[in-house]
Image: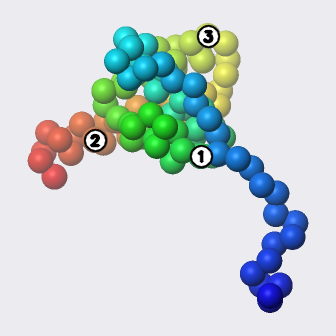
Amino acid sequence: MSRAFVDEDASFEPEPRYTLPDPDSPYFERAAAMALIEGANSGNTRSAETATGFRWGEPRLRCHVEALLVEASERDDLRIVQLARRFLRKADDYEEKDETGS
């Protein structure tokens, strides 16, 4: 096989696992918001979206991400603050599209 198709130095990283309560649980949406932020922090938003069933910026999760933002601000976790703000901007974009029908 050609060396172009073999990456002997590649390291295998398993897909992250997210511990989520049952979707019927009142805590599911908060856990999903946390998973999406964690996924983005690890550079793997898609796996968090798949695990939670929510897209990045899902407006339904706004209140949970706002709470995570406050908590991260209080403990000076600048990376999580940055990701939460980015999530909220995306939620704004989705809400604007829904209002305009685009």
Q: Residue at x 43, y 13 (%)?
A: 27
Q: State the separation of the CA atoms marked 2 and 1.
A: 21 Å
Judging by the rendered image, the residue that carries numbered circle 3 is 74
Q: Residue at x 57, y 25 (%)?
A: 19
- Which of the marked residues, 2 or 1, is nearer the chain's N terminus? 1
Q: Are marks 3 and 2 in contact (CB under 8 Å)?
A: no
Q: Secondary structure at mark 3?
A: helix
Query: Is residue 82 something that shows in the picture?
Result: no
- Looking at the image, which is closer to me, 99 or 17? 17
Residue 67's spot in the image, x, y percent?
46, 14
Count residues near mark 2 (Cα–Cα under 10 Å), then give few for <14, some for 14-19, many for 20+.
some
Residue 99 in the image: above or below residue 73: below
Quadrant in the picture for the N terminus = bottom right
Q: Amino acid at mark 3?
A: Glu
Of circles 3 and 2, which is in front? 2
Q: Are marks 2 and 1 in contact (CB under 8 Å)?
A: no
Residue 37's spot in the image, x, y percent?
54, 32
Query: Is residue 8 something that shows in the picture?
Result: yes
Judging by the rendered image, the residue that carries numbered circle 1 is 44
Q: Secondary structure at mark 2?
A: helix
Residue 25's spot in the image, x, y percent?
39, 14
Judging by the rendered image, the residue that carries numbered circle 2 is 94
Count residues near mark 1 (Cα–Cα under 10 Å), then give few for <14, some for 14-19, many for 20+.
some
Q: State the separation of the CA atoms marked 1 and 3.
A: 25 Å
Of circles 1 and 3, which is in front? 1
Q: Amino acid at mark 2?
A: Tyr
Query: Where on the picture, by quarter, is residue 47?
Result: top right
